[in-house]
Each structure stands twice: as C-alpha cells, then as structure tokens.
Amino acid sequence: MTHPSLSPDSRPSPAPISGVSHLQLVVTDVAASRSWYETVLGARRFAGGGPDDDYVALFHKGADVAIVLSQRARDAAAVPRVPLDHLAFAVADAATLQTWAEELTARGVAHGGVVDEFGRPSLQLVDPDGISIEFAAPHGSW
C-alpha cells in the first residue's frame, strides 16, 4: 500500500530491517506467562526471571526472536493498556501446524484446532493474559 500523498517515484526507501528482534508484552503474572510461552513455543529463558526480577526474556531459536514478558504495575490503572489484536507466528505448512496442534493438546494447552482462515491454515490460542496467539501456515498449504 502506498501513502496517498506520495507518488511511486517519491516513496522513501524501506527501512533496513532484517526481521523481528523482539516482542515485549506486559503481563499480570510473569511466572505463569513464562510457563505458558515455554510450553507453547518451546522458548527458553536467556535473561531475567529471577526472584527479584519483574521480567523474563525468552528466546525461540528457530524463529530467531526474543519475547520479553514484563510485570504489569500492581495498580493496573497506572499503566495504559495498549490494544493488541493478536501475535502471529509463521509455520512451514498445514501438516506442521496440525502436528503442533496435536502436541499442544498433549501438553494440555487449550485451543480450537486448526481452522481455515481465508485459505490459510491457522491455529489460535489465548495466553494467560488474554492475548490472542496464532500459528499460521501459508495460503494453499492444506
């Protein structure tokens, strides 16, 4: 999508990004969220998470992405909640997604199964803070 005030010849160069560095989510219970993301993603702690820490940083090697879980202030009204519709992770294909859904079921993680979302296989879950998490395979990989 182009910006309406810019002609194709005057568009700025794309930012020199190579991927996602990290995601930082504000959660109500760092320990519970850590357990959930470790169980669902297989992410591993690389920083924080100690008894005096109000955050934990997890890393998923395959996606080369860090997820930082920060403790929400005790007075929730003091910290504005920024809406996040959902966080989606890419997977190779529908077969991989179905296998992962079965693994999550075996781990006791609630989900609605793999569904067709506009031609794309999708597995949708909700983390302990109500954040929607999706695993999505490419269109046409059924």
Image (cartoon, rainbow, N blue to C red):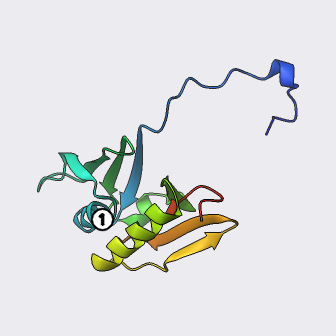
Q: Nearer the viewer, residue 51 or 88?
A: 88
Q: Is residue 133 visible?
A: no
Decide: is 89 above or below 75.
above
Give the x, y percent position of residue 132: 49, 67
Picture residue at 33% right of the left edge, 66% below the top: 28
Q: Is residue 61 visible?
A: yes
Quadrant location of the C terminus in the rendered image? bottom right
Give the x, y percent position of residue 127: 39, 69
Find disc 1 in the rendering and name its residue: 33
53 to the left or right of 64: left
Give the x, y percent position of residue 92: 49, 53
Give the x, y percent position of residue 78: 42, 59
User: What type is the residue that disc 1 sits on?
Assistant: Ser
Figure quadrant of residue 37: bottom left
Quadrant location of the N terminus in the rendered image? top right
Picture residue at 53% right of the left edge, 28% below the top: 17
Picture residue at 18% right of the left edge, 53% below the top: 49
Q: Nearer the viewer, residue 133 or 112?
A: 112
Q: Secondary structure at mark 1?
A: helix
Decide: is 42 above or below 18.
below
For mark 1, does the 10 Å Cα neighbourhood hold few (<14), some (14 to 19), or many (20 or more) residues? many
Picture residue at 85% right of the left edge, 19% below the top: 9
Return the residue found at the far left. 51
Decide: is 20 above or below 28.
above
